[in-house]
Image: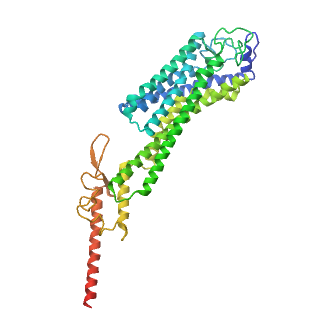
């Protein structure tokens, strides 16, 4: 591709020098693909949240919904690529627009800063849930409105300030903050051979209103993730210390242990999901930050960085959708492996197996004779035991909708039986065997006395 200094500004010649026509085509086509993928991913999150009222009641899903709505708009702006750039602009492949279309695209791309802001709000939400022990209702009532207000007010204020300063001009890959003509000032604002008609000091506004703010948000999000990790780690260590001190002869301690395990597991799942969202967030903006920093320092563009910028900058909606469906995929994968049982069934089956092992060895700490398993009227007697006694935590469990149901297991022949009945049968068999042994011991003692 041949350019002349009269038709093409000097700075644009430097930025595009050495790029063939095929390379310029690649830079123009990639955002069409990744932008469309991002719009599809964000649309999936929007539809999935709206069609399930239970999801809409959670702050986490409402934050994702708002972020996805904005991402649909900003990814669409990226997806148009070079089409809105004014027609006839040299050094750009397939420009079809006008100054007005370029301004609109630049405004929408500038609004993509709201994505990092909502990622920071998600990190704050996780921190409040795990570290501060705030309930879903408390976060929704006291904090959520300020989360949305901060994102919306900050992003729109900066967007309209830049619009008033006429900062949205051709920026090689798409329309965004740039000076016009491109050789009106240098990389650090030094005067050029011609005066700036639009976007004066755009290099400074790029870093103050976008990339500088972006990395401040990344730093805050990283801090919140670090605190979240420390909180989860402390819970796990506390659980391990409590597990070593726990005695198995206390119903209250066993219940507390179970609750702590469930809480720790939930915190670990929250931490993993938060880390994946942060990874998608950083992956989206890392290449663009390096590319813009390289342009600022050297005044030239590296083609490989431009390609990565075109791939990842419009891609956040798609990456967010992958993280969003990750729990569903894990559940599906487990079901494919045959692990279709729910947590209540697993815990009930484990309790039965563990109790059987306790009775399997004679003379253990849970022997039938003289222990609290054998005393009538005690909390774990054979009749009215913890597995069948009314009001105990093992006999009935509450569903999320408030209904109570007994724990049932299934025989190999398909019949169902309760956990309490199984334990009572085993306990009865054990007592019968011990009675027979005791009778044999008494007979032996009488024979010895007669002799």
Q: What residue is shown at x 64% (from left), y 10% (from top)?
A: 198
- Residue in front for this viewpoint, 310 or 196: 196
**Position of residue 7 in the picture relative to residue 50 (left or right):** right
Q: Quadrant of residue 360?
A: bottom left
**Position of residue 6 in the picture relative to residue 388 (left or right):** right
- Residue in front for this viewpoint, 224 or 195: 224
Vertical relation: 384 (above or below) 267: below
Vertical relation: 237 (above or below) 54: below
- Residue in front for this viewpoint, 20 or 45: 45
* Position in image of residue 341 (x %, y %): 38, 49
Q: Which quadrant would the C terminus be assigned to in this image? A: bottom left
Q: Which quadrant would the N terminus be assigned to in this image? A: top right
* Position in image of residue 141 (x %, y %): 37, 29
* Position in image of residue 413 (x %, y %): 32, 58
Q: What residue is shown at x 71% (from left), y 27% (from top)?
A: 302
Please say whether residue 98 is visible from this viewpoint.
no
């Amino acid at each position: 591709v041949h350019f002349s200094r009269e038709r093409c500004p000097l700075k644009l010649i430097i930025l595009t020098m050495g790029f063939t026509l095929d390379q310029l085509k690649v830079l123009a086509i990639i955002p069409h693909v990744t932008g469309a993928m991002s719009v599809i991913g964000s649309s999936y999150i929007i539809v999935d949240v709206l069609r399930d009222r239970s999801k809409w009641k959670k702050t986490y899903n409402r934050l994702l919904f708002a972020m996805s709505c904005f991402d649909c708009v900003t990814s669409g702006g990226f997806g148009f690529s070079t089409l809105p750039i004014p027609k006839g602009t040299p050094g750009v492949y397939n420009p079809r627009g006008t100054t007005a279309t370029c301004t609109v695209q630049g405004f929408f791309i500038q609004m993509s800063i709201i994505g990092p802001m909502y990622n920071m709000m998600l990190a704050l939400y996780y921190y409040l849930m795990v570290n501060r022990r705030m309930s879903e209702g408390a976060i929704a009532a006291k904090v959520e409105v300020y989360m949305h207000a901060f994102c919306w007010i900050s992003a729109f204020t900066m967007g309209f300030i830049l619009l008033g300063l006429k900062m949205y001009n051709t920026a090689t890959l798409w329309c965004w903050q740039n000076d016009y003509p491109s050789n009106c000032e240098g990389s650090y604002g030094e005067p050029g051979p011609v005066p700036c008609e639009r976007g004066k000091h755009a290099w400074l506004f790029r870093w103050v209103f976008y990339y500088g703010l972006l990395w401040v948000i990344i730093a805050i999000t990283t801090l919140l993730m670090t605190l979240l990790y420390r909180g989860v780690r402390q819970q796990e260590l506390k659980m391990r210390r409590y597990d070593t001190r726990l005695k198995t002869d206390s119903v209250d301690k066993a219940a507390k242990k179970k609750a702590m395990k469930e809480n720790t597991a939930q915190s670990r799942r929250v931490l993993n999901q938060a880390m994946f969202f942060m990874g998608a967030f950083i992956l989206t903006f890392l290449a663009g930050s390096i590319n813009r920093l390289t342009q600022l320092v050297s005044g030239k563009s590296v083609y490989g960085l431009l390609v990565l910028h075109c791939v990842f900058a419009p891609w956040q909606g798609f990456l967010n959708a992958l993280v969003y469906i990750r729990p569903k995929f894990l559940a599906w994968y487990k079901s494919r492996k045959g692990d279709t049982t729910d947590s209540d069934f697993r815990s009930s089956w484990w309790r039965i197996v563990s109790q059987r092992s306790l009775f399997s060895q004679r003379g253990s700490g849970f022997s039938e004779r003289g222990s609290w398993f054998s005393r009538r009227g005690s909390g774990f007697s054979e009749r009215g035991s913890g597995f069948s006694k009314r009001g105990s935590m093992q006999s009935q469990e509450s569903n999320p909708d408030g209904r109570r149901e007994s724990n049932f297991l299934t025989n190999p022949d398909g019949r169902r039986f309760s956990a309490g009945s199984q334990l009572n049968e085993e306990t009865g068999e054990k007592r019968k065997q011990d009675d027979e042994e005791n009778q044999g011991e008494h007979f032996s003692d009488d024979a010895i006395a007669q002799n």
